[in-house]
Image: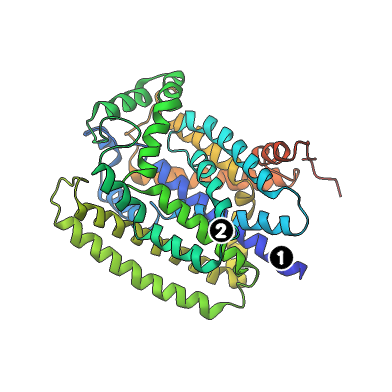
Amino acid sequence: MKAIVNQRINIVDALRGFALAGIVIVHIVENYVGAPTPENTMQGTHIGILDSIVDGFIFLFLRGKFFALFSFLFGLSFYLQLNRKKEGEDNFIGRFIWRLVLLFLIGYVHSLFYRGDILTVYALLGVFLVLFYKVSNKWVLIFTGLMFIGLGRFTVFLITHGGNIFIPGDFSPNSPLVLSYFEAIQHGSLWDVFKTNAVEGHLMKMDFQLGVFSRGYITFGFFLLGMVVGRLRFFENFRELTSETKKVLIYSIVGFFVSLGLVILVFSQLGPEVKFDNWLSMLGLTFVDLNNIFMTFILICVFVIAYRKNWGERVLNIFVPYGKMALTNYFIQSIIGTFIFFGWGLGYLGTIPNSSAFLLALLIIGLQVIFSKLWLSYFTYGPLEWLWRSATYFKWFKIRKEKA
């Protein structure tokens, strides 16, 4: 039984590291902007056909998919903590909420560098997981399905008609709000970036998360899905669930191509300048979400199928240390990325071709994988993981490993 548990932990950590790798590729190619970009400011990122291929690859396989995978794993982690509670941990709910408070604080510091931070979003949405932890799988999956097909988006659009919820103005590329932010990250000091991200960045992000773009609703849906998959003990028994995994893969491939066709059909009717102030555009955004969701399912299934193979397990276990230190690596990669692109650092914003940025992302991933493996050969936890755990339990956990 112990061997099964260890396999489960390994594949989950490997999958988390894999998800983090996809996230850093997207962020590096996007130059860590975390907002719309003004017209004629990113020409240097597209200088050849290879840059357009990278764009297409990221749109189809990475953007919107790996954040979903990371969210799925957050919900799975919630179940693992709940399972430990059933084995004797006291005051699970209070400790979990306190853990989210700490995650919010870590995320807020991170958001000062990069306004696209997801940690603060996870901390806020994670509180609502508590409402579902005793709800049956059937009702959790029904609610998840409603999130995935756009209930949140349609409800918000019915009320706002496409307007913002938290911050006035619009997010068009040449709006004063976007131009001011871009000026700060392109030419401002680190303090200027901190100032624009401290409050305005979070309000703008919450409009993206809870407005018609609906990222937060999809995130919470994946939280719930991860919790259900944890209840079903899929990752404890993934080697035996071969036919089930293949069925999900086949259905997801079909769903991916059908939703992609619907995306193309809807947006072809909206003209070259799409405005998100009508029901057809809302339907188009929902098809985009479904396309991302099906690709996320495909990624999970392919990862699991590959991991069942001896060669696949050996290769994918490269991501295990990276995944174990996901919080630390996520924080560090944002500091590295913003230093490379923003004005307070090297100032390469909008000047590095996408193809080169893609290779740069692979380099950062490789270096972080090596760093994580080296660090965990001497220490039990990553630096931020250790701090988070110690603060959660109000005691300093021993971080250095015992010498053999």
At label 1, which amino acid type do we have?
Val
In this picture, residue 332 sits left or right of residue 268 = right
Measured as percent of width and height from the top left, residue 5 is found at: 71, 65
Q: Earlier in the sequence, mark 2 or mark 1?
A: 1
At label 2, which amino acid type do we have?
Leu
Measured as percent of width and height from the top left, residue 266 is found at: 19, 59
**Dot 1 lies on which element?**
helix
Label of residue 15 in the image: 2
Which quarter of the figure has residue 104?
A: top right
> Residue drawn 55% across and 56% down?
132
Depth check, front residue: 378 or 2: 2
Residue 36 visible in the displayed image: yes
Label of residue 196 in the image: none
In this picture, residue 118 sits left or right of residue 369 = left
Measured as percent of width and height from the top left, residue 147 is found at: 40, 57
In this picture, residue 148 sits left or right of residue 316 = left
> Residue drawn 76% across and 43% down?
378
**Picture mark count:** 2
Instruction: Using the image, determine if residue 184 lies above or below residue 338.
Output: above
Mark nearer the viewer, 2 or 1: 1
Which residue is most to the bottom? 243
Residue 57 visible in the displayed image: no
| Distance from Cα at disc 2 to Cα at disc 1 | 15 Å
Which residue is most to the right? 404
Which quarter of the figure has residue 160?
A: top left
> Residue drawn 67% across and 60% down?
9
Residue where numbered disc 1 is placed? 5
Circle 2/circle 1 CB separation < 8 Å? no
> Residue drawn 78% across and 36% down?
396
**Dot 2 lies on which element?**
helix
Q: Quadrant of the N terminus?
A: bottom right
